[in-house]
Amino acid sequence: MGGPFAAAAAYHVVLLAGAARLLRNPGPPASGAPQLPVTVLIPSHDEERVIARTLAALDAAGFPRELLRVIVIADNCTDDTATVAAAAGATVWERANPDLRGKGHAIAWAIDRLRAEPQQSGIVLLIDADCAVSPELLREVEAAIRGGATIVQTAHVVANPEASHVAALRYAGFRLMMTVRPAGLQALGGSAGLYGTGMGFRRDVLQAAGWKALSITEDLEQHLDLVADGHRVRFLARAQVASAAPLTHEDAESQQVRWEGGRARLATRTVPRVALIALRRRDPVLLLAALDLTAPPQSLQAAAELGLVGAGVALRSRGLVALGLASAAGQAVYVIGGLAATRAPAPVWEALAAAPGLVARKLGVFGRVAAGGTPDQFVRTHRDAMPTQVEVPPASPVGGEALRSP
């Protein structure tokens, strides 16, 4: 009964061991003058409040202007996103298709426009409209792809962990999911994964593959397709994007339902088929990419471990109690070790005391998912505007500076 959860805890410990090694020694920073042109695509839906900050952070990165093109996809916007972006110096592509809404459709439409252009060399970088980029991000992405990578994923961090316990716990979740996990997967010889923003592609890869993923988990879906085509994503720990987290559970819940529901649906519908393909091909990279999607979220893992111990006590089964406690110990190693490896700031450690309440609330989210309450389209998450100063913790094991956007 508890075997899958114990196996998941062991898997996460293995990921942590690999991630810790990679984060301690991420390799030298990017050096040399950039040579490859970079096209930044920013899918945006009613983002007039934050798009100027995102564009200012890209401009402040100091990448050679003759090699940089920034395109804002103003997708079914009803506000002044296009006007604000154009005033900030970006190229704006406006898309109006109320029947095909969502980030996946916007990206696919923009990629098709790029594929029709005569210039097919260089890099395409996808950044969310509410993200600031670290000063070194563009150079790290360019250097990695110039050095032989075909697809790269940068770390995505929460900008405001000090704002509330909810934001601090979201920071912890992002660090475990979007720094420790991809670093661990890469250390195991697998593909680091795609996580929605801060994704860089050699342009000819997208020219050949296009963008087929249109669901609310477009990044996970596209990753499986690309790995099946023989690609492997490289994780760039030195390069980071940062965005503000919601401050309350109520504000965060719609986003959590969308993420958890989309991931569960993809795992249920796609993973068995992809795993069979991987086994037939004897492709361990594709198999790991598929099986990674079946690992339960940390909140569900914690609830299952508590249930195992409780069932063991009620049934007087020492085996169940031992399994639950062993699984809980493995999860504790992963969470505490992962936050230590990424040098989480003090508010995150303090917020761990509120984690049991988060687990209880997340069970409600999983209940909604199980009952079919997952939205099929994007639903905006309410959050405060991105802070004027977005900071990556200065004690990051891979360096990192304050990200500033005016």
Image (cartoon, rainbow, N blue to C red):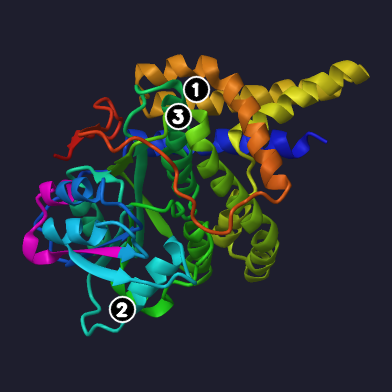
* Residue 113: mark in rendering: 2
In the image, is 289 to the left or to the right of 133? right
Q: Position of residue 307 (x, y in %)?
A: 77, 25
Q: Which residue is mark 1?
A: 336
Residue located 30% across and 30% down the image? 397
Query: What residue is shown with label 3?
Result: 172
Looking at the image, the residue that sits furthest to the front is 78
The kind of secondary structure element at disc 2 is: helix
Q: Amino acid at mark 3?
A: Ala
Q: Can residue 205 be seen at all in this image of the molecule?
A: no
Query: Where residue 36 appears, x then y in whole percent?
Result: 17, 66
Query: Residue 209 at x, y = what percent?
Result: 43, 76
- Residue 232, compared with residue 133, is above or below; it is below
Q: Nearer the viewer, mark 1 or mark 3?
A: 3
State the CA–CA distance, disc 3 to disc 2.
37 Å
Cα distance in 3D space between marks 1 and 3: 10 Å
Q: Secondary structure at mark 3?
A: helix
Q: Which contiguous range is marked in magenta?
A: 57-73
Position of residue 9 measured from the top left corner of the image (x, y, whole percent): 64, 33
Badge 2 crowding class, 10 Å Cα cut-off, few under 14, some 14 to 19, many 20 or more, is few
Numbered mark located on residue 22 in the image? none
- Give the mark, 1 or 3, whose residue is nearer the N terminus: 3
- Which numbered disc, 1 or 2, marks the residue that appears first in the sequence? 2
Q: Residue at x 41, y 23 (%)?
A: 340
Q: Residue at x 58, y 64 (%)?
A: 283
Between disc 3 and disc 2, the foreground one is 2
Instruction: Tell me the SS state at disc 1.
Output: helix
Residue 72 located within the stretch drawn in magenta? yes
Question: Compared with residue 224, is residue 306 higher up or lower down, i.e. above or below?
Answer: above
For image coordinates 49% across by 36% down, the residue present is 252
